[in-house]
Amino acid sequence: MGKRKADPKSDAGPARIQNRKAHFDYEILERYEAGLVLQGTEVKSLFKGRANLTDAYCEVREGEVWLREADIEPYDHATHFQHERRRERKLLLHKREIRLIARRSQEKGLTIVPLAVYFKHGKAKVEIALARGKRQYDKRRQIAQEDERRTREQIARGRLG
């Protein structure tokens, strides 16, 4: 008998868990990919897409990078061994990357923000970025530009006129 083909959907992880608020609140300067240290049931919750990065941020402490305030929901089918929802989680990066990120984050107004959580080759990854906070008038300008772009698209499609 021949080998059965694996179901392409069986190994596929969830869609990326995005931090949409980060792109609105921050100007993204540099991006990095970091591994994520997880406890048992956190992996299954993430695989199901049960996480929220809205209030999350990263900090460098004692030569390590930590993800803070990321909310990973408890896994539904787990026993009494559940993980803490908003615990600190260690990020895995090369030492030279950590030193560079630490040095750059000390600059005026720069912070480390998680942009997305996803699976790559069966491992949980976090996309983090060095970012500068946007001013209120920059946010208003961005909203106005987006509204103008949508209006032009609708006119081009013949919906407005």
Image (cartoon, rainbow, N blue to C red):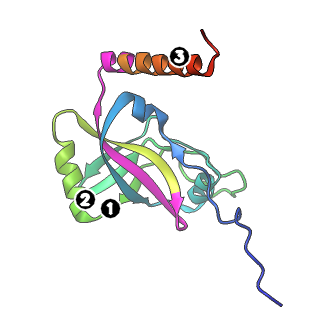
* Mark 3 or 1: the one toward you: 3
Question: Secondary structure under badge 2?
Answer: helix
Viewer-nearest residue: 77 or 34: 34
Sequence-wise first label, 2 or 3: 2
* Mark 2 or 3: the one toward you: 3
Q: Which residue is mark 1?
A: 93
Give percent across and percent down for residue 99.
19, 57
Quarter assignment of residue 68: top left
User: Which residue does the image show at 66% across and 56% down from the upper left?
Assistant: 80
49 lies above or below 9:
above
At label 3, counting other C-alpha atoms closer than 10 Å, the crowd grade (few under 14, some 14-19, many 20 or more) is some
At label 2, counting other C-alpha atoms closer than 10 Å, the crowd grade (few under 14, some 14-19, many 20 or more) is few
Q: Which residue is mark 3?
A: 151
Q: Quadrant of the N terminus?
A: bottom right
User: Which residue does the image show at 19% across and 46% down from the upper left?
Assistant: 104
Q: CA distance from mark 1 to mark 2?
A: 6 Å
Q: Which residue is mark 2?
A: 97
At label 1, counting other C-alpha atoms closer than 10 Å, the crowd grade (few under 14, some 14-19, many 20 or more) is some
Give percent across and percent down for residue 51.
56, 45
From which residue to which does the magenta span run? 119-140
